[in-house]
Amino acid sequence: MLSQLFGKDTIVGIDIGSSYIKAVEAEPAGNGWRLINAALQVTPLDSCRDGVITNVLDVAQAIKTLLRSANIRSSGAVAAISGSQVIVRQVQLPQMTEASLRKSIRFEASKYVSAPMDESSVEFEILGNVEGTDQMNVMLVAAPKDLVQTRVSVVEAAGLEPISVDVEAFAIMRSLVECCACDDFATATIALLDMGASHTDVNIISNGNFALTRSIPIAGDSFTNAIKTLTGFSHEDAERLKFEMAAQDSIDKLSVQEVESKCWRVVQPLLDELLREIRRSIHYYQSQFPEGAEQATVSKIVLTGGAARMPGMAAYVESKLSVPTEVGDAFSGSLVSPGRFTQDFVVEYGPVLVVGTGLALKEEMARARLRPAA
Ligand SMILES: Nc1ncnc2c1ncn2[C@@H]1O[C@H](COP(=O)(O)OP(=O)(O)OP(=O)(O)O)[C@@H](O)[C@H]1O
Ligand SMILES: [Mg+2]
């Protein structure tokens, strides 16, 4: 632990998704960071769903295998919680010290959390005073205690020291916004959509701050399950068919019916439902501003996660939501350079390594902030 504090050892970011576990190691390099190691491994079937790990030992074993195969030697790890049970809200409260807020935070959180407070973990960060008022902005995070504890248990059972448990949305923000080599995002409103297997995370970031975060339970697995029901195939075969569907004809082409595909016919209604929910989130965010307010305009959508890799996804989302859309990755235009990894690797895996990279950098960035300026 001391070696970690003094910056000798690296920390591995472990993103435990319901479909893939990703591990990322990065080290400081120049003004930013360099990727040392990155790898992924299939999550044991049915051991993780909507952020809940149901089989600690199998997941821990899969992490061990992943670390060994990728030659990852870090002893400390940062993991994250995610899913519909995690509440992330920016709230305004009367200005007070951190110590006073710590005493009343559970009461404040109880206004936003439906689960019993004694079964919830609550954390907060004071973001700063609201100009011209006696209020301050506070980032509030609440989640069931078991959700956090299970992450800690898995990391320990994999032989690693749990350094901290983060929230996936924060890791995405770190990776895509804080590590962006440009400062385009500092003054814009953008939507970051992480389309995984069991859920899609929607994060609206305005002027570099969280404005809304929501988890929608429609993602890659929903598409696979629809194909499974259509064909009667196993999960693996339905998954393969899904990959083939979009690899043959990108989904923006499928949607204009240039080609007939039975699979697309069952996938499209689910994707459209997901996009309707995303549009609803964007409208909800916009409803807080007077009409025409600059801050209300979402100027860009950045897609990440495995489902964002479906050929044609960005074009399809753009056509449905009328917002310029691109696939983002952890290493392009980023302060994190891909190091020894090739451009092909970046294109292929960059979008799914966004959470893992943000986790790997959590402590690194905190250390960098502590380092005296040169
Ligand atoms: N090229 C592709 N075409 C279609 N689907 C893809 C492609 N690549 C990955 N996927 C899908 O992406 C999903 C996995 O993405 P990801 O690794 O981001 O999910 P996860 O982090 O395991 O899940 P979650 O975060 O929801 O628990 C799977 O449903 C997989 O089928
Ligand atoms: Mg994920």
Image (cartoon, rainbow, N blue to C red):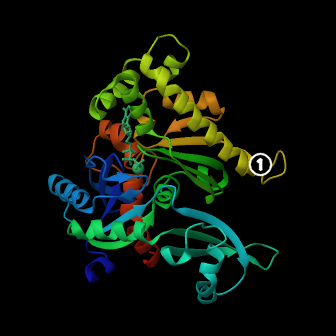
**In-image side of 158 versus 49 (left or right):** left
Residues 285 and 354: in front is 285
Residue 228 lies, in percent from the top left, at 36, 29
The kind of secondary structure element at disc 1 is helix
Residue 313 lies, in percent from the top left, at 49, 30
Q: Is residue 76 visible?
A: no
**In-image side of 369 versus 103 (left or right):** left
Q: Which class describes the residues within 10 Å of circle 1: few (<14), some (14-19), or many (20+)?
A: few
In the displayed structure, 311 sits above or below 283; it is above
The answer to which quarter of the image holds residue 241 is top left
Residue occupying the point 37% across, 18% down: 248
Residue type of the residue flagged with mark 1: Glu
**In-image side of 187 versus 16 (left or right):** right
Residues 127 and 151: in front is 151
Quadrant holding the C terminus: bottom left
Residue 281 lies, in percent from the top left, at 66, 47
Quadrant holding the N terminus: bottom left
Circle 1 residue = 294
Q: Is residue 155 visible?
A: yes
In the displayed structure, 323 sits above or below 245; it is below
Residues 25 and 144: in front is 144
**In-image side of 86 versus 241 (left or right):** right
Residue 122 lies, in percent from the top left, at 53, 75
The answer to which quarter of the image holds residue 237 is top left
Residue occupying the point 33% across, 56% down: 34
